[in-house]
Amino acid sequence: LVQQLRFFEEQVPIDVIRASPDGRSVLVASSHAKQVFAISQRADDGYRVLGYFNFPGRVLSACHAKIDGTLRLLAVLHNNLLATVYVPTAQAENPLEPIPDADSRARFRIVDRGATLVMYCEANNAVLVTGRDKLLKEYKLPVDTLEKLEWRKAPAAPIEEVQSHAVG
């Protein structure tokens, strides 16, 4: 055992663990909680918690995305939101408190219902989302603050939808 960390006060399963491509951080989340923790991936850093984000919904999926030279976190939330925040490169001022919006620069986009998984393709800067409808959808990066979202309107159409097919 190298390190043992407890992330959540209540007993919830950790079902999202993603290592960053640059080898600096790991994202830890549960689909039963609204928090995503960023921890150092480096032994010389002591695998310390860099900070955590508190989202406005349970986190179903999360991944890293290197966009414009900065590492970000993309997340699909249970309330049909696609969210992005900047991943900290150093430990937050107070790691026991959520990273403030001013530092995380949280942005959101409403996506189609049933979204459960987000992926990022660095080769073409594509944000890909899939879910219960079994369609692979490409969306633009989230750009709105939570306050600017228009909940009464239908979500903006994805850039592209790829139909799945029966295998066999």
Image (cartoon, helix red, strand yellow):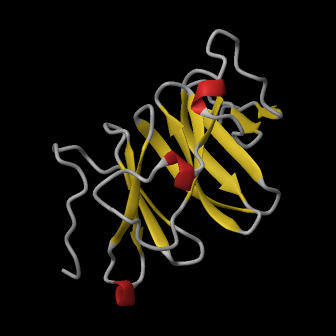
| Number of numbered callouts drawn | 0
Residue 135 vs residue 14, the one in the foreground: 14
Residue at 22% from the left image edge and 66% from the top image edge: 5
Q: Position of residue 82 (x, y in %)?
A: 60, 36
| Quadrant into which the C terminus falls | top right
Q: Can residue 57 be seen in the rendering of this structure? A: yes
Q: Position of residue 127 (x, y in %)?
A: 71, 46
| Quadrant into which the N terminus falls | bottom left
Q: Position of residue 91 (x, y in %)?
A: 41, 71
Residue at 73% from the left image edge and 69% from the top image edge: 69
Going by the image, does 68 lie left or right of 87?
right
Residue 163: quarter of image: top right
Residue 88 sits above or below residue 154 on the image = below
Residue at 82% from the left image edge and 34% from the top image edge: 160
Residue 2 vs residue 151, the one in the foreground: 151
Query: In the image as oriented, which residue stretches furthest toward the top?
Result: 152
Q: Can residue 131 be seen in the rendering of this structure? A: no
Residue at 49% from the left image edge and 34% from the top image edge: 77
Residue 108 sits above or below residue 99 on the image = above
Residue 66 sits above or below residue 104 on the image = below
